[in-house]
Image (spheres, rainbow, N blue to C red):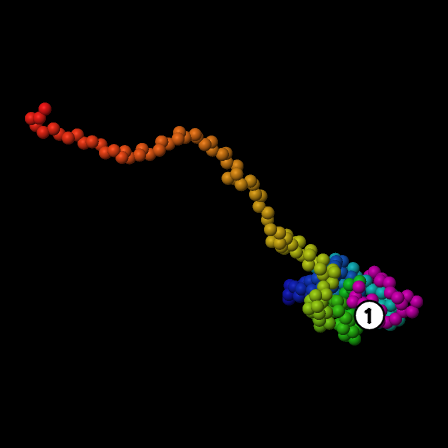
Amino acid sequence: MKIKRQKTAKKTLTFYKYNFGLRQPYQVLLDGTFCQAALRNKIQIKEQLPKYLMGEVQLCTTRCVLKELESLGKELYGAKLIAQRFQVRSCSHFKDPVSGSACLLSLTADNNPHHYFIATQDQELSTKLKKRAGVPLMFIIQNTIVLDKPSPKSLAHVQTAQTSQLVPVHQKKNIEHLKEEQGVAKDSERRGKKRKRVTGPNPLSCMKKKKQIARPPTAPAPEQSKRKRKRKRNKPAGTD
């Protein structure tokens, strides 16, 4: 089951990598609900998440999420301690903090320019994020971290780009990089360019001219003598 889950995650990561430019280290934004679920299910986020995503991961949160956990009191004190261990990403709500969900929504606006993964158990937040293309979602189910499959919005975005041939620049670079890795580009270049054969001089022109041997003039064919050879007549016997 674990192998199948990792294969599914790898397929999803490949989709986001080649269509939305996600790269390692993967930046995972966690909210309070995810930290609380990890604590309840005894999940070591720092250990398990990099193994599941099969790559380097940066775990992070925001000041708004920390403020929200602090305001909720003792019940979420453990989740607050977990969230405090992560890097804090700056947001535009430094002076006037907002809810954790509103803060994460603001950081993924405009097609998620920083390529954040969002780790949350908040169903309302997940529904809103699925309406945006290129935002990978993570959640905990049955004591296991799960990377959600691409949303219909993300699939439709890719389909539209392919249909209209409006391929993003980073996707073109990825395609060229793949071609170089597989040697496809070199093959196509070889096919496109015709080989010029090295042609030497015409071998017939290089042959030495044969010296013409002066032949003696041929005697004209002897004309048939008009005179007929006189036949020797046999003298009759007894004649002198």
Classify residue 212 by image quadrant. Answer: top left
Residue 105 drawn in magenta: yes
Residue bearing mark 1 = 105
Residue 109, x across and y down, in percent: 81, 68
Of 38 and 137, the residue lying toward us: 137
Indicate whether 104 appears above or below 212.
below
Q: Residue at x 70, y 68 (%)?
A: 164
Residue type at tag 1: Leu
Of 91 and 146, the residue lying toward us: 91
Q: Which residues are magenta?
A: 84-113
Q: Residue at x 79, y 66 (%)?
A: 112
Q: Residue at x 71, y 60 (%)?
A: 172
Indicate whether 234 appears above or below 170.
above
Residue 166, x across and y down, in percent: 72, 65
The majority secondary structure of the magenta stretch comes to loop
Q: Is residue 129 left or right of residue 198?
A: right
